[in-house]
Image (cartoon, helix red, strand yellow):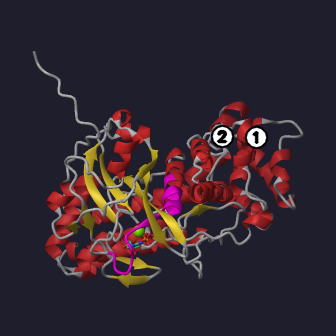
Amino acid sequence: MASVVAPPIAAFAFDNTYARELEGLFVPWQATKAPQPALVKLNHDLAEELGLAAQSLDATAAALLFSGNQLPPGAATIAQAYAGHQFGGFSPQLGDGRALLLGEVIDKHGRRRDIAFKGSGRTPFSRGGDGKAALGPVLREYLIGEAMHALGIPTTRALAAVTTGEVVRRERNLPGAVLTRVAASHIRIGTFQFVTARGDEALLRRLADYVIKRHYPELDGQDYLGLLRAVSERQAALIARWMLAGFIHGVMNTDNMTLSGETIDYGPCAFMDRYDPATVFSSIDQRGRYAYVNQPLIAGWNLTRLAEALLPLLGEDQERAVAQSLEVLGTFQDRYQHYWLQGMRQKLGLARVAADDLALATDFLATMQGQGVDYTQAFRRLADAAADTGPAADAGLRQLYADDAALKAWLPRWRSRLHSEPGDAAQRALAMRAVNPVYIPRNHKVEEALDAAVERGDYAPFEKLLAVLQRPFDEQPSLAAYAEPAPAHESAGYQTFCGT
Ligand code: AMP
Ligand code: MG
């Protein structure tokens, strides 16, 4: 009789290609032991997707595993090397100063995913840092990453959060924590910059070949210009999704932009409430480099840094290589706008393409500006306005405006455009509600959840908020408070801080 061997508890089927194939881009390194690890949260759905038998993992075993105290078989922890432009200035060596890659697994859908710790102690890349993470930022990354995922935006995800039992010193003492993060990979524009800055062309070629194989297998091997084009395309689509959702990353340094096209590194990020293109929340972004409206431009700037890093691979004739790269980069803003407009059409309930869609979309946004209108609520209430044809159809939307004169002029244009659309009002409203969320991570709700956890060890608000954010499109009357922005006097001057 064939015997069925049950996998050991918490077994990931690791297959660590990065460590095997990219010698020179990492340092083998061990996690610092946590004195008293305790499980805060395990993402069961994601664990299951990764083939981890999480049901059989009790809280104690999970705490040991996700603190790095007891590594799962097959994990080979490494700190990855990378460089990066931070707020425009180049650092030739950043690297995983408080993170470690455990390895890669193939998930249930056949996708290769990285499993990594953040907050697992000092590494050779730590510079002056302590290698630790505080509980608040770990929970913030958990919440926002899962919210982005539920909104359908490509993102790294949180697999687990544990507290370490250690005190982490920031402006004050805070509970230490480790986040386990899952990503399509952790390869960043800064990874390429690291290699090119060292002049190691052989390694650069290996890295580019590796990225093509892992993330763009549809490309011919060695089509490095094609790689630049493909990464630009994914980033154009990604940034469009951010803009459509009102998401502000806050620290779009080149080390925080992935080759896979996933959002990574939730530090000072936040969602815009009142529509204002100049919105910036991050306390360290004093000049507004990474303001909402700048994000497409910054993405283009970052991709130019990627193009520079790839230049040595683009042929002997470097002048020609530069010209070809510039041609690719020159299409980025158009590609971005293509994706954005596509998304805007859906948000506005438009299935057909018409010549003045762009004007219709930007004019709707213009009605909001300076009127204190909540961006997320405005689109959701526009769906209500699409559902109803009676005299009160627009009441909910109009209520959001201090002065609704511009809106009143815009609505008939939109309605007349809807006349040429297929489907009835009910179908249209349904489609609009499937893309215009009711619930986003409201800044005051996120702060409330983090505060309860950090100050009182009360995880109920975090759990509640997480559950709400996992179903962003399903309106529930009992959750009305989660759909509201903070009162204006509370949200004025709201600031986020970097996740260190
Ligand atoms: P981030 O701002 O999180 O994208 O990190 C930028 C760089 O600083 C990366 O190289 C991080 O590894 C490093 N870093 C951030 N926080 C810490 C910390 N507490 N200890 C050591 N390195 C850190
Ligand atoms: Mg980073």
Please report the residue visible at 23 percent of the width from the left and 42 percent of the height from the top: 13
Image quadrant of residue 375?
bottom right
Say if residue 75 shows up in the picture: yes
Q: Is residue 339 above or below residue 248?
A: above
**x and y, in percent, of residue 449 in the image:** 62, 54
- Which residue is at the front of the view, 409 or 343? 343
In the rendered image, residue 84 lying in the magenta stretch gets the answer no
Left or right: where 440 falls relative to 329: right
Residue 80 x/y as whole percent: 27, 67
Residue 292 as seen in the image, left or right of residue 300: right
Q: Is residue 137 magenta?
A: yes
Mark 1 — residue?
384
Q: Is residue 325 visible?
A: no
Q: Residues within 10 Å of mark 2 (few under 14, many from 20)?
A: many
Residue 252 x, y percent position in the rendering? 47, 70
Q: Provide the residue span drawn in magenta.
A: 126-142
Quarter-of-image position of residue 294? bottom right
Dot placed on the residue nearer the N-terminal end, 2 or 1:
1
Please, is residue 333 above or below residue 158 in the view? below
Which residue occupies the foreground of this view, 53 or 201?
53
**Image point (26%, 78%), residue name:** 320
Q: Quadrant of ligand 1?
A: bottom left
Which amino acid, mark 1? Asp
Q: Which residue is mark 2?
A: 433
Question: Which of the 4 image quarters holds residue 26?
Answer: bottom left
Indicate left or right for 349 with 299 as reference.
right
User: Residue furthest toward the top?
Assistant: 1
Badge number at residue 223: none
Kind of residue sitting beneath label 2: Arg
Residue 244 location (% of width, % of height): 59, 56
Q: CA distance from mark 2 to mark 1?
A: 9 Å
